[in-house]
């Protein structure tokens, strides 16, 4: 009886032995003929991916806007995966694994910030030719981005509201709302290691937004007091600050893209637009890691 090769095992096209045999048969050149769709196209669902750009107007710049939006959504998903892995590692007292997750996310964040370049030159005339086609669509309604904000401690049950008609999305966001965020996990780790994190910051209502506390700043100041090589908690603090700085960079690029393409017009999603984004940009992420620098 014929058997199906185990994925990744001998007899599977992706196995190392099969790759070596194929390269030898091809004389070192790429395979040029397949019975079905090219494996690359199948693996990456490329046909599906390229079918998802569906402009609603004849304005060429709309395609750039759609692709930028979709790229950001993919990166939000990737960053969430890394942040959740880092948070879970902190809960397990595995600081090296948490640092690895944060570093991976930082690289993705850099790409995310740069993704604004795709629409950086969008003129108000170009944007105006397709903006009405958005209707009430707004990036504020992105549930993948909302997950990131919840992981950063920017919690609000009301912000789940746009997704009440999507039960699975709503349930996922409600779980994230009720769970400790990335910074919460770091503070709980400090507490377990004997640093003076106030009890109210270790056990609290996780569905409430994080608020800065002077006791937390003092705890982090103790971490920074030991700047010898090998202090993994100091490395953690700096990795968290790298994360926070990139969040602010992304928010600022968003603000500038909106200011450049539409000025102070009201947002499509019902907000004041520029004013709303400016307030969000001013909020420090992981605030005590910023404020302690004044006293060091």
Image: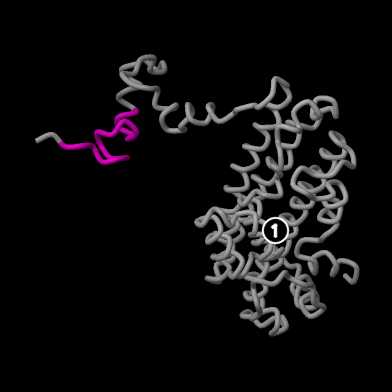
**The residue stretch that appears in magenta:** 3-19
Q: In this orientation, does residue 152 appear?
A: yes
The quarter of the displayed image where residue 27 is located: top left
Counting from the top left corner in percent of width and height, residue 6 is at 26, 41
Counting from the top left corner in percent of width and height, residue 40 is at 44, 27
Which of the pair 185/94 is nearer the observer? 185
Which of the pair 33/73 is nearer the observer? 73
- Quarter of the rendering occupied by the C terminus: bottom right
Residue at the image point whose x is 62% and y is 59% from the top: 99
Q: Provide the major secondary structure of the magenta segment.
A: loop
- Residue bearing the label numbered 1: 239
Residue 97 lies in magenta, yes or no? no
Could you say whether the residue bearing mark 1 is in a helix, strand or loop?
A: helix
The quarter of the displayed image where residue 233 is located: bottom right
Residue 14 lies in magenta, yes or no? yes
Counting from the top left corner in percent of width and height, residue 208 is at 69, 72
């Amino acid at each position: 009886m014929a058997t199906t090769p185990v994925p990744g095992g001998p007899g599977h096209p992706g196995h190392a032995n099969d790759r070596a045999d194929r390269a030898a048969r091809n004389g070192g050149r790429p395979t040029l003929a397949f019975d079905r769709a090219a494996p690359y196209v199948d693996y990456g669902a490329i046909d599906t991916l390229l079918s998802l750009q569906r402009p609603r107007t004849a304005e060429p710049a709309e395609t750039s806007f759609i692709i930028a939006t979709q790229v950001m959504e993919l990166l939000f998903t990737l960053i969430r995966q890394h942040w959740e892995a880092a948070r879970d590692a902190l809960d397990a007292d595995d600081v090296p694994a948490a640092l690895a997750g944060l570093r991976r996310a930082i690289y993705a964040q850099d790409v995310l910030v740069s993704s604004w370049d795709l629409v950086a030159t969008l003129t108000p005339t170009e944007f105006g030719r397709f903006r009405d086609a958005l209707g009430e669509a707004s990036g504020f309604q992105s549930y993948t981005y909302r997950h990131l904000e919840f992981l950063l401690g920017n919690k609000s049950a009301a912000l789940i509201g746009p997704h009440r008609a999507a039960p699975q999305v709503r349930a996922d966001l409600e779980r994230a709302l009720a769970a400790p965020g990335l910074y919460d996990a770091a503070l709980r780790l400090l507490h377990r290691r004997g640093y003076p994190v106030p009890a109210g910051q270790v056990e609290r209502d996780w569905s409430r937004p994080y608020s800065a506390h002077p006791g937390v700043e003092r705890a982090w100041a103790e971490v920074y007091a030991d700047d010898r090589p090998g202090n993994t908690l100091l490395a953690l603090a700096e990795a968290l600050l790298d994360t926070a700085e990139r969040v602010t960079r992304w928010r600022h690029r968003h603000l500038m893209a909106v200011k450049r393409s539409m000025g102070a017009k009201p947002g499509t999603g019902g907000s004041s637009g520029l004013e709303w984004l400016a307030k969000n940009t001013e909020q420090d992420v992981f605030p005590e890691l910023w404020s302690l620098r004044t006293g060091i």
